[in-house]
Amino acid sequence: MNGILAEIVENKKQELEQRKQIRPLEALIEAASVRPPARDFRSALRRRGGPVRLLAEIKAASPSTGPIRADIDPGSIAALYESCGAAAISVLTDARYFNGSDAHLEEARAAVSVPVLRKDFTIDTYQLYESRVIGADAVLLMAQVLPEEAFATLYHQARALGLHVLAEGHTPKQIEFLVSIGAEVIGINNRDFETMTVDIQTTLKNRGLVPPDRVLVSQSGIARREDVLLLEQVGVDAIQVGTSLMQNQNIRAKLAELLGNPLDAV
């Protein structure tokens, strides 16, 4: 791991030390113990023969794009996503690189009935309890970031806490590892973090590595109806779309275009 990922993870380690000083793990464990059960992220994204499912993302910025949307109202955007057919919502909570916050997730979840994913760089058990406390139904774990042993530990801890997991990889080796530990929801990220290039062929080439009993999510670079149809044809369960929605002043129209719906139907 190098480049922007290494920088983000190093910053995240420093941020976590500060958070732990402000709110010790014991306090988080106590707060998490009274949270209601998580909404079923896996079932929400399972396609079951119909159109591909949508995991719609709320993010204000990214390292690759810079600022994406200034007038971010997470609750209103989440409600719009749900009304347009999103099966689940993804919310960036990293502040330094994505202009996100825990409050963004809390506001989004309060506005919808579908599951909400906390999209952050999860590298520590502390963040799992933190995710439960702020209301996340699922967390992202990245094989591009975590050594296999650490990934497996965090994965099983998350499931034991009642959190669902979007287990993400990019290379065949990473995807095979995710399958081997029993990951139920597997994301294939079309972005190569070494070069920051995006290629939807990544999902197409690796689709066969994911057994049919797992939920398969294609991530990054999905911006056109043609992209959606291509992924739908190879049996992808869900697509994760953020930048192309958040950049558009008319999110409803962009969703209608991507999903192949008349504008008045979303």
Image: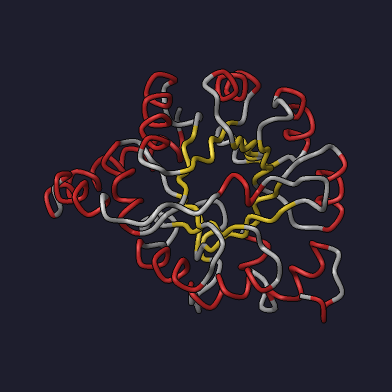
- In this image, 191 relative to 231: left or right? left
Quick check: 253 above or below 43?
Answer: below
Q: Point out residue 149 in the picture as x, y percentages from the top left corner.
A: 39, 19
**Residue, x 40% and y 43% (percent of image)?**
162
Name the residue nearer the viewer: 214 or 218.
214
Q: In this view, does 112 lie to the left or right of 22?
A: right
Q: Residue furthest bottom?
A: 264
Numbered label tally: 0
Q: Look at 70% across and 71% down and name the residue there.
A: 84
Q: Quadrant of residue 207?
A: top right
Colour mapping used in the image: secondary structure
Image quarter hosting the N terminus? top left
- Looking at the picture, does residue 192 appear above or below residue 111? above
Q: In the image, is 39 to the left or to the right of 170?
A: left
Q: Nearer the viewer, residue 101 or 84?
A: 84
Q: Residue at x 41, y 67 (%)?
A: 104
- Please state which of residues 248 and 87 is positioned toward the viewer in this rendering: 87
Q: Is residue 10 above or below residue 108?
A: above
Q: In which quarter of the image is residue 161?
A: top left
Q: In this view, does 103 lie to the left or right of 215?
A: left
Q: Which of 195 and 84 is in front in this view?
A: 84
- Residue 108 x/y as whole percent: 47, 68
Q: In which quarter of the image is the C terminus?
A: bottom right
Residue 131, x across and y down, in percent: 35, 51
The residue drawn where x is 49% and y is 59% is: 91
Q: In which quarter of the image is residue 147?
A: top left
